[in-house]
Amino acid sequence: MKRLKTIIFIAIAALGLGSCKKALVETPYDFINPGQLGTTEADAKLYVNGALNAINGGNMFQYGAFPKVLELDHDDITGPDWGMGDFGAGNFTAFWGINTMWSGPYTLIKRSNFGIYKITPMGFDEKAKNNALGQLNFLKAWGYFLLVRAYGDVPLYKIALEEGAAPQMPRAPIKEVYEYIIETLKLAESQLYSVKDGKYEIGRISKGAASTLLAKVYLQMASGALPGAQITVMTGPALRTVGTSKVRVAMPVPMTFTKNVVAGYEGFDAKAYFKLARDKAMEVITSGDYDLYPTYMDTWKLANRNKLEHIWSLQALSGDEELGNTISKEYLGVLKTAMQNISLDAPQTLSGRWYGVRDHWYELFEPEDQRITDGILHRWQDANGFYRFFPGKFSDIVKGVDVSPTALAIKARYGFQSSDSYVANSFHIGMLRKFAGVTDPTIDRQDFAFPFLRYADVLLMFAEADNEYNNGPTTDAYTYLNKVRLRSNASEAKNLNLESFRSMVIEERRRELASEGNRRWDLIRWGIYLQVMNAVDIDENNVLKRRQERHLLYPIPLDELSANKLITGNNKGW
């Protein structure tokens, strides 16, 4: 394991690629430098590991900046005001980790470029060498995809400094960035092992991952460019006035919005890119490399990590200060003792659990959908020993006021006791049990495998793109949407038109992919981010959801603006 955490990139640490020295200098993990490495497959793997470790590192997941910069700014997430009050309330520049959205991907790109430079002249087995290069090309493309979504125009560094790259570059137009992402992903596709290849290592980036990311890129471009489409979203105010008090509104309502074309996407042919997204998603589906697990909760079992449905996930190490993460602690909590499990019938004392889904999100589901019946923690014991329950709408059931057969079944299912309490505050949030899949749930730094790419996403991408390309849902579109829905015991989607199917898929992504770093970006690419966020206004926990035009893009770090003289200004409003 020690060598898996080693690589000091002297050339990388010397200068920032498109960023300031201070922001991008990396702390070495060990005393190995490129001059000490040879030209074998094992040496090439160390360069790849060095790039991969950037994801776990201090500019991304190590200190908890990610997934916050991916996930805390959308309509469905909530938490205490001290956790949500800056970034989650639209105060992007007040969040301590905002600059990691820039420095993290650029560190990854920098390491990938350097690894490609060092591995390319090596003379070991050509297929193995291509696979190493493919992983680095994939990581570079993924880094630029994160950047272009978040910042719009960004500097492009296609080669390492050692190959003659300029240390400073101007911002490239969105169109040029996407062209380079597509070019790089196509190259990665041609280089990488399939998961069925005998030399493929579980947990590594595969050909299927490159294809999936390519479908995601095409879909981003297509939906961003589509003009005038209408989308119905379950949303609306979380609070209403009763007398002199504000009370929670449990039920969201359907609201229809006309989408805006995303700035910088005007030149893309939406129809053509929907076809490319559909076809690429179908390639992944027909490859037979992936499938859904039989039940939704099977997806999150520790034993199923990196298998079947999981196309590419964060690779972490339990208890490790550099390769561990705090995702499970923050989204579900740390258990008091190892004997307790995140289960439906064993309440547990939890600390942490700062971010979760809103009451409104819970109301998006049919009553027997496994993503809420099994996927939400309904009863737990807090740090003070009090037993709590979620959601608040079950109050009459818990207290025995409602004794209907349905109510009694719910009470028995979740083990509610009449002494359990609910207080309408920021610690009564929907905690997703998907975050329970860690080796040791009693420690802070765990090994949750954050899902970057998942097969359910592929099925939903196909359904979305196919519907748009064909001006309405086809049999295939229904098939793959319903494969996701029926797996979780939701009803079959049918008898929908172009607009209602579009809305159904976007809402299904909201349900299925909750807290996996997709919701903000789905709202942005469909051009309804401002409408949806402003329809909520202020959520149940008094988290401000109102947004302005400047929130469509993140602010470029001030250090970057000072260091890179070719970037002449920040994004609008920052």
Image (cartoon, rainbow, N blue to C red):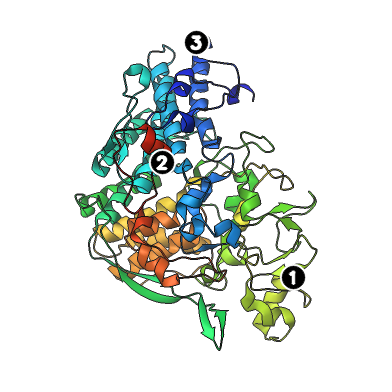
Left or right placement of residue 317 versus residue 453 in this view: right
Mark 1: which secondary structure?
loop
Would you identify the image quadrant in which residue 7 lies? top right
The image shows residue 531, relative to residue 172, as above or below, that is: below
Mark 3 and mark 1 lie on one chain; the one further toward the N terminus is: 3
Mark 2: which secondary structure?
helix
Nearer the observer, disc 2 or disc 1?
2
Q: Position of residue 271 (x, y in %)?
A: 22, 54
- Residue designated by label 1: 415
- Residue designated by label 3: 35
Mark 2 and mark 1 lie on one chain; the one further toward the N terminus is: 1
Mark 3: which secondary structure?
helix
Mark 3 and mark 2 lie on one chain; the one further toward the N terminus is: 3
Label 3 with label 1: CB-CB less than 8 Å = no
Q: Position of residue 303 (x, y in %)?
A: 64, 44
Label 2 with label 1: CB-CB less than 8 Å = no
Q: Amino acid at mark 2?
A: Leu
Q: Residue at x 30, y 57 (%)?
A: 466
Q: Residue at x 68, y 73 (%)?
A: 423
Q: Position of residue 33 (x, y in %)?
A: 53, 15
- Packing grade of label 2 (10 A; few <14, some 14-19, many >=20) is some
Q: Position of residue 343 (x, y in %)?
A: 71, 59
- Residue designated by label 2: 558
